[in-house]
Amino acid sequence: MAQLLAVVGGGDLSTHAVLAAEALRKAAGRRNAALALEIRGKGGGNPIPEAAIREAKAVLLVGEGDLGEGRFGALTRARAAIDDVLTDVNAVLDRLLAGTASAPAAASASAIPTPKRIVAITSCPTGIAHTFMAAEGLQASAQALGHDIRVETQGSVGARDALTAVEIAAADVVIIAADTGVDRARFAGKRLYATNTKAAIRDGKGLIATALAEAQLQAAGTTDAKADGPARPAAAEKKAGAYKHLMTGVSFMLPFVVAGGLLIALAFAFGGIDAMKPENAGTLGFALGEIGAKAAFALIVPALAGYIAYSIADRPGIAPGMIGGMLAANLQAGFLGGIAAGFIAGYVTAFLNRHIRLHRNLEGLKPVLILPLLATTITGLLMVYVVGVPVAAVLAALTDWLKGMQGASALVLGLVLGGMMAVDMGGPINKAAYASAAALLSSGVDAPMAAVMLGGMTPPLGIALATRLFPNRFSKPEREAGGAAAVLGAAFITEGAIPFAAADPLRVIPSMVAGSAVAGALALTSGVTLKVPHGGLFVLPIPNAVTNLPGALIALVAGTVVTGLLVGLLKKRAS
């Protein structure tokens, strides 16, 4: 029979109650203590059997509300808030165990959590919104729970607030909330928990509690994303890993796309539409075109492939991946070939690294000689003889179709791409549409990018419009946040609409999807193209960056109005 009892009252915090109960169960298991658990709330639960109550020595009462305390007679009691359990479950359980051997006067004492030192890293593929939203979520949650935290953001301009060796050494736990690959070598010997940015944005307190309870020791020399992470089913881990590897490659590829696209647009601005023709050699327009088209754009596919391989196999994968990506570019296999080369190089390098065993005096040869040579040879031969030609044929067919689309096909593609940008506002669906459009720029297909950018700007702009047209549908804080959403939307940061969607998803998300789909469809059917993959309204005035600028503005305004009107009509009055 169980010697310890615990009753968790969830109330309106049913998710937190389940997390607290699971934390208690695992903590008791680590101590080999028999614990009978009951969760009380709207959904009911499994009542503690009477026989267990008769045999028990103490009961822990967690949370508020009716916990059925009368059942426990003269049993020793300890009390704790749900946040106490989520913050430091070990301290709470220790207090309960101590209470079984203490005088009754100590039985009602509340468990006092011990503050922890936490270091964290946040990162997302574009390194703009989700990176910093996740950091803010962790910082606010740690402060509310009484912990000390330092967060390093690995954004589009590199690492900010970089963690020092002293801070890492003093930390009780390391949290990595990232959608891209993060080098973990410096955390060897520390307890580490890895998840995605969405977990930190949506439930920072729950993430911190889970990390404190479930973090695992980071082994020395283990840097891959799957090592020592949270316990997850193998299939889910594999799926999440493939997506993360791809997004790591995309995040490193984007600066080449942005720089190349802008330089090509500036070349046309200074030298006209013929700026890059040989007869204009020596002019400023020709030089800018050379830099953008023959240097920056030439590195897009190698960078994509190289950093996909890096995410899978760490630094030894970069050379085979980039070389495979260059072969893909030379074989006209484009970004599809680059993706294939990256995964081939990454998994081949990782396989070789695991299975090649050398004397310790020769281990230094693996990363600089053996792995690059063997992995590059295997990747290159596969690209030349197996992958390159068929992928090039697929890409050529796709490119011809996209360049020649008109009428119904353009309308449907615009609806799909625009709508995808608003479904999860920076999540996997949004990123899939964006990454595809950005990669197509390297193949000279720039219409999808227009649908994606305009569709991504529409949600926060439409929300901002709704807060002005229908103020009674929003609370005062929401109306004030509407202005910030407008600025974020103008800069093509779709995540500015997340707080509004989270507050009323069933009405707001469909409204945003409809508006973004309209914007994307109008953009493609009116022949709008875009050579730059980011910047929003701030890049539209650049000469030749946008084809059919009036059409782009009409599509953006139409999508914004559709979202704003639908949100205002569907939402209920604010209480």
Image (cartoon, helix red, strand yellow):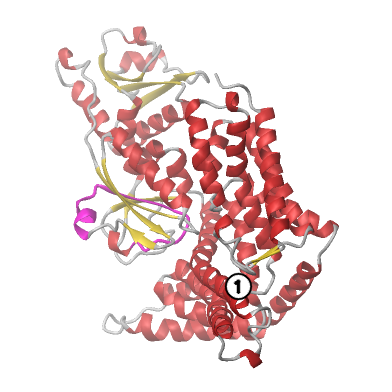
Quarter of the image for residue 279 reads bottom right
Q: Give the range drawn in magenta.
A: 165-184
Q: In this view, does 49 lie to the left or right of 385?
A: left
Q: Which residue is drawn at 39% across and 29% down?
A: 21
Residue drawn at 61 percent across, 51 percent down: 456
Q: Is mark 1 on a helix, strand or loop?
A: helix
Task: Determine if residue 426 is in view.
Answer: no
Q: Percent x, y for residue 524?
A: 75, 59
414 versus 281 height, above or below: above
Q: Is residue 155 left or right of residue 451?
A: left
In the image, what residue occupies the spot 38% across and 30% down?
Answer: 20
Q: Residues within 10 Å of mark 1 (few under 14, many from 20)?
A: many
Please state which of residues 306 and 242 is positioned toward the viewer in this rendering: 306
Q: In this view, does 114 lie to the left or right of 42?
A: left
Q: In this picture, is 131 found above or below 435?
A: above
Query: What residue is disc 1 on?
Result: 265
As rendered, which of 525 and 245 lies closer to the eye?
A: 525
The residue depicted at 20 percent of the width and 21 percent of the height is 99
Image coordinates for residue 104, horizontal then vertical, percent: 17, 13
Identify residue type, mark 1: Ala
Q: Which of 5 and 132 is in front in this view?
A: 132
Nearer to me, 495 or 548? 548
Give the quarter of the figure containing the N terminus: top left
Q: Can residue 291 be seen in this view?
A: yes
Residue 181, percent from left and from top: 44, 62
Decide: is 544 above or below 198. Answer: below
Q: In which quarter of the image is the C terminus?
A: top right
Is residue 179 covered in magenta? Answer: yes
Q: Count how many numbered circles sit on residues in the image.
A: 1
Image spot of residue 223 (x, y percent): 37, 64
